[in-house]
Each structure stands twice: as structure tokens, then as C-alpha cells.
Amino acid sequence: MVSGSYQRGRPDATRDARTMTVPNPGRFRVEEDLRGGRSPRKVGPVIWFKAAVFALLVCNTTIFIFTGSVSDALDASAWLVLLALFTLETEFGDRFRDARATAAIRAVRLAAGAGVGAAAIGYFHEGEWLDAINSSLWIAIVAWLEIQIRFARAVAAHRAWFAAVGATFYAGLGAIVLVWLWQREWFDAYDALLWLTALVIIELNVLQASRDRKRAA
């Protein structure tokens, strides 16, 4: 039994709990982003759209693995891995700056790049010329994106030239979509259009990362 004098002198724990101010972790994350020169990330329609595109590409890759040729399965899987890596670097690059994470990303990218190259060789060997051209074009696009990420200052100094190269790539991918539609290869056309959408998303991420670096400088 607690004595009455002790009860009168004891702080009201319930009242303290009611009046206690609980820190808002989201506020601290926003403040940290602003101090680090990054724009606060919000979960909105754009994020859901990106997730939907990635999910559809996962479904397409699964279909190619189970119904396509070996080259189709290897090509789709390798490109999906590369897309995931580009997304990690452009959206969450600040969280993967330590040496171990960087080495792991480079190793996975090297393996995926080897898979893409093997798939392209397979397409040429099988006489699948449209697939071979599409794969070769995407290899060039990856090199173009890598240059934009690794050499942001040089790209900023020659923005018009890089924009022209990008427009050429978009035109080439669009032409491949039209050819597949003309050949009534509906699923291939749909898959190519979906990857074209993914390229737009990556390009927007690269531009946003470049703006964030400029604000941080």
C-alpha cells in the first residue's frame, strides 16, 4: 500500500504522458534532406507510377523466362537488373556511397552487362535482327546514361549535344515499337513501349540527381 503523502508528491505519470511531445521522425528526415542539399522525397503518384512500371517489367521478364528463347530470358533478366541498379543509384545514391556497397553494385552491373552482351550475340547468331538491333541500341543507351551519371559536369557543359543523342535514341526505340506493331508482334511492341517508359523515368531521375548535386555544391 502506497502512503498518501507519497501519492500526493508523486508526479502524475498519466498527465505527463498526455502532455509529452513525441518527435516526428518524418520531420527530421525532411530537415536532414534539406541540410544535405536533397529534395525531400514524398510518396506520391509518381512513385506509384514508377513502381507499377517496374512491376509490369517483372511480369514481362517472367513471361520471357518461361516462354521465350534462352536469349530472350537472358536479355530480359539482365536488363531488369540494370534497371534496378540505375534506380538505386539515381534515387538512393546517397545511401550507397560506402566502398562495400559500391563494389557490390559494380560487380552486379558487370555480371548483368555480360548477360546483355551474351544475349545480343545470341540474337545475331539466331538471325533475330530486330531483337539484335534493339539490344545493341539499349547497350548504347546504357553507356550514354553511365556518362551522364559519372561525368555530370561535362554533360552539363555539353547539354545540347547529349540532348540530341538522347533524342536519337528515343527515336530509334520508337521506330522499333512501330516495326513490331507493323509485324503484329503485339507483346514485343508492348514490352518495348514499357521499356521506353522506363528510360524516360531513368532520364528524369538522372536530371533530378544532377539538380540536387548543383544545390549541394
Image (cartoon, rainbow, N blue to C red):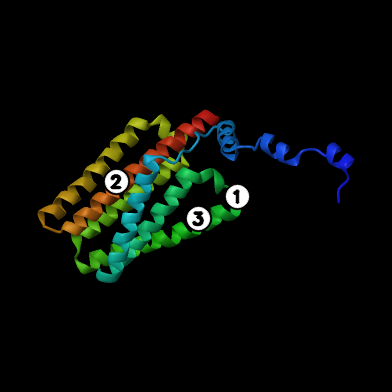
Q: Which residue is mark 2?
A: 197
Q: Are marks 2 and 3 in contact (CB under 8 Å)?
A: no
Query: Which residue does the image show at 40% across and 58% down from the upper left?
Result: 81
Task: Say what secondary structure mark 2 lies in.
Answer: helix
Between 128 and 89, the one lying in front of the other is 89
Height in image: 197 above or below 118?
A: above
Q: Is residue 174 left or right of residue 74?
A: left
Q: CA distance from mark 2 to mark 3?
A: 23 Å
Checking the image for residue 98, the label placed there is 1
- Quadrant placement of the C terminus: top right
The reply to whether dot 1 and dot 3 touch (C-beta < 8 Å) is no
Question: Between tags 2 and 1, which lies in front?
Answer: 2
Q: Earlier in the sequence, mark 2 or mark 3?
A: 3
Q: In the drawing, does residue 86 fall left or right of residue 181?
A: right
| Nearest the eye: 101 or 45 | 45
Residue underneath mark 3: 105
